[in-house]
Amino acid sequence: MNEFLTPKQVSRAIQVSESSVKRWCDKGIIPTQYTGGGHRRIALSELIEFLRSSKHQLIRPEVLGLPATTGQTVWVIDRATDQFTDALLKGDEEQCRQIILDLYLAEHCISSICDLVFAKAFSIIGDRWVCGDAEVYQERYGCEVSLRVLHELRTLIPHPPAEAPVAIGGTPEGDLYSLPTTMVELVLRDTKWNALSLGTNLPFATLGAAIKQHRPRIFWLSVSYIKKEPEFIQKYTELYDEFGLDVAFVVGGRAMTESIRQQIQYSAFCDNVRHLESFAQTILNTTEKHSD
């Protein structure tokens, strides 16, 4: 996909006149950047945001580097989940892309797409694997496809404001599951946070270094696997004791059992990214009230 588009490309993609697109640019209806020579350039994310909030539709998505039928199918979440699961099992990346992009263009929020489509699909695939109806390679390749789709979706979300609060996070040492922390980053960016997933398999020492450098308002830890629980609890507690008064610690993941949660401190525990979205929005609302 092209990250920046000309008015001519936009006019071809949504089948309106180029002069109309230029007029929208000049009136600020579509946020626009200008080159040194004064030429208009439209970020793809801003065009998608415009389409999501207007009556205009994406008629020729291939002009933008999107699947040719993007925006032409209205998916109900439940049906989309079933279709997405089947597409992952078949390794059909183009179908996966189209389903997710269609949902986003239909104004489904990122948090619902992550919880009700991505997460639910992998839960179904996991159950099928246990029953012998799916292979390990299908789940692993499905993860690779999903990560590529999520990274593509990231380019469609408008950049957070320059003054947006910072959130960082990742997974602890030994945890190689990248999908959850990638989804957290996406949801927070969609909630107007300057969010950055640091990646997976991160020692607590380096997480502390990242907190010192970035000074986030939120630090998240996605925990799908714990190698040694006593060591995890000790190192997590040390990290919290150092930064917990100034940073909101948010934890989640299937490895965060009730027993572990009772032994550590945190600002919020989230069963899914919609819970995280609500918590992050509460912090934003509190910040805005204090600044008034």
Image: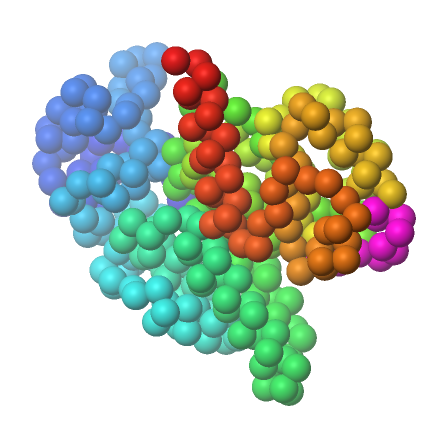
Residue 37 position within the rendered picture, expressed as x and y whole percent measured from the top left: 30, 13
Question: Is 40 situated left or right of 202 in this image?
Answer: left
Is 110 situated left or right of 165 in this image?
left
Q: Residue at x 81, y 39 (%)?
A: 237
| Residue 12 visible to the viewer | no
- Magenta residues? 224-233
- Which quadrant holds the N terminus? top left
The colour scheme of the drawn protein is: rainbow
Q: Is the residue 231 above or below the residue 44 in the image?
A: below
The magenta stretch spans residue 280? no
**Residue 70 falls in which quadrant of the image?**
bottom left
Left or right? Give the position of 60 relative to 180: left
Between 282 and 51, the one nearer to me in the picture: 282
Residue name at image x 66 percent, y 28 percent: 247
On the picture, is 22 further left or further right than 73? left
The one of 7 and 150 positioned closer to us in this rendering: 150
Counting every numbered tag in the picture gives 0
Q: Residue furthest bottom?
A: 132
Residue 49 seen in render: yes
Q: Position of residue 291 (x, y in %)?
A: 44, 14
Q: Quadrant of the C terminus?
A: top left
Please report the residue visible at 59 percent of the width from the left and 59 percent of the height from the top.
144
Residue 230 is a magenta residue: yes
Q: Horizontal and vertical percent for residue 227?
A: 84, 57
Q: Eyeballing the image, is 172 above or below 130?
A: above
Q: What residue occupies the far front of the structure in this picture?
A: 262
**The quadrant where residue 25 appears:** top left
**Position of 185 relative to 102 (above/below):** above
Which residue is depicted at the point 40% across and 72% down? 83
Q: Position of residue 67 (x, y in %)?
A: 34, 57
